[in-house]
Image: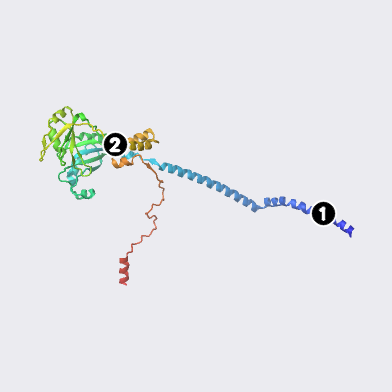
């Protein structure tokens, strides 16, 4: 028995070696099988395609993000009110205009005809209108509830070109509807020359510019007459200014001091015009606050942008002046964008309004 066992032992060892050699070749056989299998090739190609698609998608996403960033940066811009400034250069101011241009179509046409001689007109608007009832201005304007003692107002005329607006300045001092017009440029207003100007005080609140034209016209040729008015009521504050074309006329006008004017016989207070300095004690804190805000706003602006901003703040009106220099932020609109509160689509159904009253009527009818 021992000899037989010894003879069988070497056979088992050979079998084990053979199995171990086969195990070593399993990995190689598996790889060869994969390489020869067409399905595996297709899978690899699909994986490569997916990887390339993913890379392409990532690239396109990066490009879209870059475009959106550029659009958002473009959407942020500083509003210098350039269109409004350009419009102001084509606009003239007209003071002491007859208020009949509002109530009479004939007078309005005559006004338009008078200024059309200087060039084509784009628009006309009226301001500083006095009303006789304490109702909203729009309602009073529609009802034409004008103040009886105030027969004049201010107007702004916008011409098509700047050259025509400059030509229209020649109408300053001309008589229209029996009133002397005061015409000035909005973008380049004439400077007040105190050497040729007198201050007239103790005027009646309902005093008219034409009365001052009649009185001081004897002293010399007048350039302009202006009565300072209240912004809320558009009635006079009791004083005004008369500017002559020659400074020698001022001496003649001073001789009319304490002359009685109008039906109320008010004594005029006439002096040489002086430049009034602002109260420094009251304005110190406000000036410091305003200067700090201006420095912050102008910090990141170029010289050209500072010039545009300063021009807009000097020329424009109160509403546009407050918005000049502000940063406009927003997303640029694209085709197909939806707006909140607005229905889109051609196939939308317009549903009728259903009220309780209509439903009760239908039920009762049945």
Q: Residue at x 29, y 41 (%)?
A: 318
Indicate the quadrant containing the N terminus: top left, top right, bottom left or bottom right. bottom right
Closer-to-camera residue (263/90): 263
Closer-to-camera residue (289/346): 289
The residue under label 2 is 283
| Residue 358 versus residue 154 in the image, above or below | below
Decide which of tag 2 and tag 1 comes sooner along the chain: 1
Closer-to-camera residue (289/162): 289
Q: Residues within 10 Å of mark 1 (few under 14, many from 20)?
A: few
Q: Residues within 10 Å of mark 2 (few under 14, many from 20)?
A: few
Q: What SS does tag 2 mark?
A: helix
| Residue 342 versus residue 229 in the image, above or below | below
Image coordinates for residue 319, horizontal then vertical, percent? 30, 42
Residue 179 location, quadrant: top left
Name of the residue lying farthest toward the front = 281
Q: Please identify, in this view, whether the residue under mark 2 or under mark 1 is nearer the observer.
A: 2
The residue under label 1 is 13
Name of the residue lying farthest toward the bottom = 366
Callouts 2 and 1 close, C-beta under 8 Å: no
Disc 2 to disc 1, C-alpha distance: 112 Å
Image coordinates for residue 22, horizontal then vertical, percent? 76, 53
- Left or right: 220 with respect to 284? left
| Residue 327 versus residue 41 in the image, above or below | above
Q: Residue at x 64, y 53 (%)?
A: 39
């Amino acid at each position: 028995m021992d000899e037989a066992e010894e003879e069988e032992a070497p056979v088992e060892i050979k079998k084990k070696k053979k199995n171990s050699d086969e195990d070593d070749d399993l990995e190689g056989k598996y790889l060869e099988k994969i390489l020869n299998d067409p399905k595996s090739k297709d899978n690899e190609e699909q994986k490569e395609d997916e990887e390339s698609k993913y890379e392409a998608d990532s690239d396109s996403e990066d490009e879209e993000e870059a475009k959106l960033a550029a659009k958002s940066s473009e959407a942020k811009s500083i509003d210098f009110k350039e269109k409004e400034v350009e419009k102001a250069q084509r606009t003239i101011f007209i003071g002491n205009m007859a208020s009949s241009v509002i109530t009479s179509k004939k007078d309005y046409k005559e006004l338009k005809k008078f200024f059309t001689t200087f060039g084509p007109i784009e628009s006309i608007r009226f301001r500083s209108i006095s009303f006789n009832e304490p109702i909203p201005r729009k309602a009073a304007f529609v009802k034409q509830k004008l103040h009886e003692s105030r027969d004049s107002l201010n107007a702004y005329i916008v011409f098509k070109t700047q050259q025509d607006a400059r030509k229209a300045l020649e109408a300053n001092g001309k008589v229209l509807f029996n009133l002397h017009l005061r015409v000035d440029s909005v973008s380049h207003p004439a400077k007040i020359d105190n050497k040729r100007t007198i201050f007239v005080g103790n005027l009646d609140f309902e005093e008219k510019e034409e009365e001052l034209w009649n009185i001081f016209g004897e002293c010399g040729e007048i350039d302009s007459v202006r009565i300072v008015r209240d912004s809320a009521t558009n009635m006079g504050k009791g004083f005004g200014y008369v500017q002559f074309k020659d400074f020698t006329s001022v001496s003649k006008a001073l001789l009319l001091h304490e002359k009685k004017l109008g039906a109320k016989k008010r004594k005029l207070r006439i002096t040489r015009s002086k430049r009034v300095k602002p109260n420094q004690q009251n304005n110190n804190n406000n000036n410091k606050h305003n200067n700090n805000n201006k420095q912050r706003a102008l910090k990141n602006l170029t010289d050209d942008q500072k010039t545009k901003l300063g021009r807009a703040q000097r020329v424009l009106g109160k509403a546009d002046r407050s918005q000049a220099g502000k940063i406009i932020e927003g997303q640029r609109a694209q085709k197909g964008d939806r707006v909140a509160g607005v229905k889109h689509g051609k196939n939308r159904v317009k549903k009728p309004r259903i009220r309780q009253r209509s439903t009760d009527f239908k039920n009762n009818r049945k």
